[in-house]
Image (tube, grey):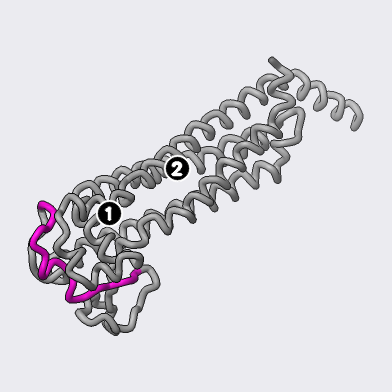
Amino acid sequence: MANFFKNKAKVILLIYLILIAAFIIYGLAFMTMYSNIHVIYKVSEAGEISFPTAMNVQMKSTKASNYFTNLYFNNSNNLPDGLIKGSFVANYAQTVYDYNIALNNYNDYLITVGIVSLIAVAFMYIFSNNSRRIYYKSNVVIGVIAPLVVLVMSLVAMIISFSVMSGFTQNETLYKTVSILYDTKYQSMSASATLRNMPADEFLELASGVNVVGILISMLASIVLIGYSVFVSIFTITKYKKTEKERKEIIERAVAAND
C-alpha cells in the first residue's frame, strides 16, 4: 500500500491533466451546440440594445447570427403550443437574446474553468508533486490548494449549469422553433410557406437536436473534476503521512551532515 502512494503520483496527475484537457475541448465544442439560438441586435453609442427589423443591419456582435425578418410566426396557422402570431421582435427577441447571453457567459466560464484548472495542476508539476517519491510540506500545500481551486470552480460551473438548463426548459418550445428558423439548412424552407404552415409537431421534430444534452454533459464533466480533485487532495495528504518516517530520516541525515 505504501508503494502505491510513493509511485503512482505521475499517473494520477497525468490523468488529472487529461480530464482538464477534455473539459477545455468540450467547452470549445459547446460553442457550436446552440449556435442557432441567436438574435442579431444593435448596440447604440450610448450602449442601448435594440432588435432591428431589417436583415441588412450591421452586426455589432459575432455571437449573433441569421436573423430572418418578416418570417416569424406572422403567417403560421399551426404554431406550437405557447407561441402566438405576431412580430417575433416584439414578442420573443428579448427572451432569446437573454438566453443567448446566458449561454455565452456559461460557455466563457467553462473555458475559464479549464484554463485555470490547467494552471493549477501546472503548479503541482512545478513543485514536483508528480515525481517526488517523498512529499514535503510544500508538496502538501500545493497538492491541496490546486485541487481545491479546481473543485470550487467546477462546483460553480455545475451550479450555473442547473440555471442554464432551467432557462432552456422554461422556453424549450420557443428555442426549438427559433432554431429551425435560424438554421441555414432550412433557409430555403423558411422563405416558403412550407415551413410556416407545417404542423407544430412536425415543426418541432425538425428541432429535436436542440435540447439540454450538451448542458447535462458539461454538468457531468464538472462532477468528474470535483470528484477527482477530492481524490488528488486525499492522495497528497495520505502520501505525505505514508512517507513521514523516510522524510524524517532524510532531514536528520542532512542535519547531521551539516554539523
- Pick the quarter of the image with the N terminus: top right
Could you tell me which secondary element the residue under label 2 belongs to? Answer: helix
Mark drawn on residue 206: 1
Mark drawn on residue 118: none
- Pick the quarter of the image with the C terminus: top right
Could you tell me which secondary element the residue under label 1 belongs to? Answer: helix
Q: Main secondary structure of the magenta part?
A: loop
Viewer-nearest residue: 100 or 66: 66
Residue labelled with disc 2: 154
> Which residue is located at x 56 percent, y 41 percent?
19
Viewer-nearest residue: 150 or 194: 194
* Magenta stretch holds residue 70: yes
* Magenta stretch holds residue 238: no
Mark 2: amino acid: Ser
Asked which quadrant contains residue 133, the reply is top right
> Which residue is located at x 27 percent, y 58 percent?
99
